Amino acid sequence: MKLLQLILFFCSFNLLCFSQTIELQSFGTGFSSPVEITHAGDDRLFIVEQAGVTKILNSNGMVNATPFLDISSKVGSGGERGLLGLAFAPDYTTSGRFYVCYTDNSSTSQPNSIIARYTVSANPDIANTSETILLTISQPFSNHNGGKMAFGTDGFLFISTGDGGSGGDPGDRAQNTTTLLGKLLRIDVSGATYSIPVSNPFSSSANGSNDPRPEIFAIGLRNPWKFSFDKSNGDLWIADVGQNAYEEINKVTGYGSPGDNYGWRCYEGDNHVYNSTGNCPAGGFSATIRPVAEYPHVGSGCSGSVTGGYVYRGSTYSSFVGKYFFADYCTREVGILTDIGSYQWSMTMQTPNITHGWTTFGEDVNGELYIAGGGNVYKITDANLSTSETDSFKFKLYPNPSKESIFIDFDNRFNDVEFVSIYNIQGQKVTDISKPFKKVLNISTHNFKSGIYFLEISLKNKPKTTKKLIIN
């Protein structure tokens, strides 16, 4: 065991040891169609369910019995409709404000996308149910609703909208600046309703014409199913779902330039013409944002649908830092983009140890990454730092990573346990606990230094069982 620790210790400072193979570890279960994961500046994760319910997933993997917010009576859900976005205000700790994007239940074929503000109640785990609707966007079809929301470092709220649906953007809406469809919007929500940042490309229209729409920040998106800001430098990443040939991932420095054109429906992917009629830019493809990555569909049916993620800025997995993680709903793969310089990114795709139709990523307050699919939330970890576990004894260890304490659930086999030991990365024993044990053992990690540890379970007449433990 100590040899393994020393190998991992060496590799943690030598990136050549890492092959960028990820491993998904179960973090929370029992959700219904999770479509968003976010945080409010603390160690809670907020899991948005498509039907209109938002639940709190705590750092120990437990889900609060009472939802944080339930607006299912207002939400029209099914297909690509539902409660699709949640963003906490930068001053949430003082204002208690947060924002949601959902499709209403006015119609199953032509719903409205609603941008609304809510507030938290006196109980920090439960929101007030009254809403203030800020913006209503009519949808000509039921699909391509976008719905991701996030605050930029400028304090303004960014909202992604799809092109209105059907297929091929039949209304040529993504390039039309008189509609909010197929756009990235940016609004100032610091007031009672919302106002227009003066640096928006069409901010002068806010004086009354609404032609073009002043809420628009960028145009030419098909169905941007998740965007994110790099928490290190503020760069904007947008994953835009393709029509039937290519999926694309876009990156711009900062937020890009007001009025950026991402190309749809004229182009999809990297300079592939889709439909050059209508409102295509005079400068052709060179006048649009070029994707940093694309990948083609292979086969028929559901052969490609990109789910955007995040650039890893956590501290647990050094080999992940600066890499962009994304996934594909259809192929069930997880992808990684690595910066190789000169605006070039290398792409790797892999089938992880657990597979689902991936619907969303999430980033916690520390920059660690999560992914959701099949009603479950998983933490993304580096498989090169995993240790094997014998089949003779299974136990649950949570939370992992840990800050203050860990819990070990032996289930009903606690009588088989002789010793519980924790070793640091140098192979030194830092904790040793002997009998008697109970079903769930709580161990304080408050005085542990941040880093990688190994939890070893010694059993009666059986091989020892080891799990990796991360202390933040």
Image (cartoon, rainbow, N blue to C red):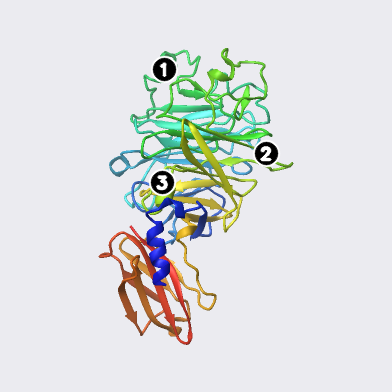
- Measured as percent of width and height from the top left, residue 131 is found at 43, 38
**Looking at the picture, which amino acid does disc 3 mark?**
Val
Q: Are marks 3 and 1 in contact (CB under 8 Å)?
A: no
Q: Which residue is drawn at 44% across and 68% down?
A: 467
- Please indicate, yes or no, whether residue 52 appears anywhere in the rendered image: no
- Measured as percent of width and height from the top left, residue 396 is found at 46, 70
Q: What element carries label 2?
A: loop
Between 17 and 259, the one nearer to me in the picture: 17
Asked if residue 403 is positioned above or below residue 234 in the image, the reply reads: below
Judging by the rendered image, the residue that carries numbered circle 3 is 321
Q: Do the residues labelled 2 and 3 touch (CB within 8 Å)?
A: no
Label 1 crowd (10 A; few <14 / some 14-19 / many >=20): some
Q: Residue at x 54, y 25 (%)?
A: 262
Q: Do the residues labelled 2 and 1 touch (CB within 8 Å)?
A: no
**Looking at the picture, which amino acid does disc 1 mark?**
Ser
> Furthest-bottom residue in view?
461
**Looking at the picture, which amino acid does disc 2 mark?**
His
Between 391 and 34, the one nearer to me in the picture: 391
Q: Which mark is residue 297?
A: 2
> Furthest-left residue in view?
447
- Please indicate, yes or no, whether residue 1 appears anywhere in the rendered image: yes
Between 326 and 197, the one nearer to me in the picture: 326
Q: Which numbered disc, 2 or 3, marks the residue that appears first in the sequence?
A: 2
Mark 2 → mark 1, Cα distance in angstroms: 38 Å
Q: Which mark is residue 203?
A: 1
Quadrant containing the C terminus is bottom left
Label 2 crowd (10 A; few <14 / some 14-19 / many >=20): some
> Given this view, does label 2 or label 3 mark the residue nearer the observer?
3
Mark 3 → mark 1, Cα distance in angstroms: 37 Å
Quadrant containing the N terminus is bottom left
